[in-house]
Amino acid sequence: MKLLKLITTTLFLLTLQANQVEAMDHGGMIMDEKGMIMNDNNDRLPSDCPKISENVDITIRAGQKHALKFNGKMFAFDKQEWDVKPCAKINITFINDDQIRHQLMIHGLPGYLYPQGMFHLELYGQGELKASLIVPSQKKTYLVHCELPQHMEKGMKAQLKVAGGDVDLPSIPGISEPIRADVYPVDWNRSTVALLLFCLLAGCVLPIVVLKNK
Ligand SMILES: [Cu+2]
């Protein structure tokens, strides 16, 4: 009896471990403890594409260090624009250089291939994911972004163009102007003017005092 119990427990534990290691695959979504891939497409052609026109390997890095070149931005991808041929297959390697969660989402794809028109990679911290998509033949610009709160507003926005794209999307760092630029209004009242004059005066006088005392 004891032996039977031991065998059953061992089998149960082994099954549990196997389930934890194996990534979960729910329809178009593959998920494990490091990240998630949604709507990976290696071979299903868009209805307007007789065949794949080209294979493009693209590495996209995400992280705070990529935003350093853009004033006022905090997060970014290492590139803000990609251009591929109609019916291209894009093999994406997504690398997160940060310790925080980032996503790579591409929107506006045909819904019969990509549910909700979306291709989605996500890493909960530093790491790497690989997945592919095949784009239709239409000359179009697709939004690429990270949808975590404030990440797109803080710079994690880019565009994927097919055949040169049909438009430049707004607020792409280094590429296009925002629809509404950030404004930092100053309330010019007596005290702010007085404070400004005081700072100017202090800035002029202090160096003289310091130099004289040397
Ligand atoms: Cu992000």
Image (cartoon, helix red, strand yellow):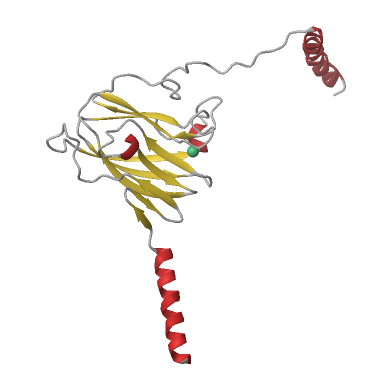
Looking at the picture, how far across and down is residue 97, in whole percent?
47, 44
Quick check: 183 left or right of 95?
right
Above or below, 16 relative to 38 = below
Q: For residue 91, what is the image quadrant?
A: top left
Q: Which residue lies at the image location 40% right of the left edge and 29% below the top edge?
A: 158
- Quadrant for the C terminus, please: top right
214 or 34: nearer the eye?
A: 34
Looking at the picture, how far across and down is residue 113, in whole percent?
25, 39
Q: For residue 87, what is the image quadrant?
A: top left
77 or 47: nearer the eye?
A: 47
Q: Work out which residue is located at the far right of the displayed protein and give it.
A: 213
Above or below, 67 relative to 180 = below
Above or below, 9 relative to 166 = below
Q: Which residue lies at the image location 32% right of the left edge and 35% below the top edge?
A: 117
Looking at the picture, how far across and down is residue 16, in whole percent?
44, 70
Quick check: 49 left or right of 178?
left
Above or below, 56 relative to 209 = below
